[in-house]
Amino acid sequence: MRASLFRTSVRSGGLLFAGLLTVAAWAAKVPHDVADGQTLFLNTCGGCHSVDTDRIGPRHRNVVGRAIASVQGYDYSPALKRLGGIWTPARLDQWLSGTQKMAPGSKMYLELDDPAVRRSIIAYLQSVSLPAAPKDPRTASPSTHWRKRQ
């Protein structure tokens, strides 16, 4: 019985250790993607876009979760205004893989073929965007309610 208990403990400990290594590897990769995404954003998008200032293109702070063509004061193309919807990671991926395919006639001409590059840029854009508000206010955390009251 002792040998059986020992084997079970060793197996459980091994599984726990493997699980912790997996989580640690995943957690270590997330900031790396954001850092890579920031560099890619600055090098690929930074000539026309800024996080906090409108340039040739609109600012991108809080772009993830924002309505398409909704930055006040920016003059969007009719093609982008007609697109409608919300900028989600999936929509941004579609946009970055071919702006003219998604909204022919828009002001932007960009095609990023590498999905890893698009993922990194989107990870960076998510890092400079507010988290989405909960759909049901009854399920919101107390800190969310506190911020809304200020």
Image (tube, rainbow, N blue to C red):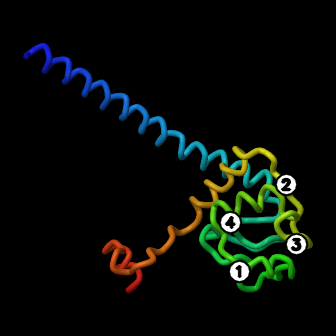
Q: What element carries label 2?
A: loop
Give the image location of residue 28, x and y in percent. Answer: 49, 39
Q: Which amino acid does label 1 sit on?
A: Val
Q: CA gap, disc 4 to disc 1?
A: 12 Å
Amino acid under disc 4: Val
Query: Closer to the N terminus: mark 3 or mark 2?
Result: 3
Question: What residue sits 31% from the left and 74% below the top?
Answer: 142
Q: In the image, what residue type sits under mark 2?
A: Glu
| Quarter assignment of residue 123 | bottom right
Q: Give the camera-side residue of 99 and 144.
A: 99
Is the residue under label 4 in contact with that under label 2 (CB below 8 Å)? no
Q: Distance between the residues labelled 2 and 4?
A: 20 Å
Disc 4 element: loop
Q: Distance between the residues labelled 1 and 3?
A: 16 Å
Secondary structure found at label 3: loop
Give the residue at mark 1: 71
Residue at point 82% right, 66% down? 102
Residue matched to label 3: 106
Residue, disc 4: 51
- Tag 3 and tag 4, C-beta contact below 8 Å: no
Closer-to-camera residue (47/117): 117
Disc 2 residue crowd, few under 14, some 14–19, many 20+, Cα 10 Å: some
- Left-right relation of 85 to 55: left
Q: Name the residue under label 2.
A: 111
Q: Do the residues labelled 4 and 1 touch (CB within 8 Å)?
A: no
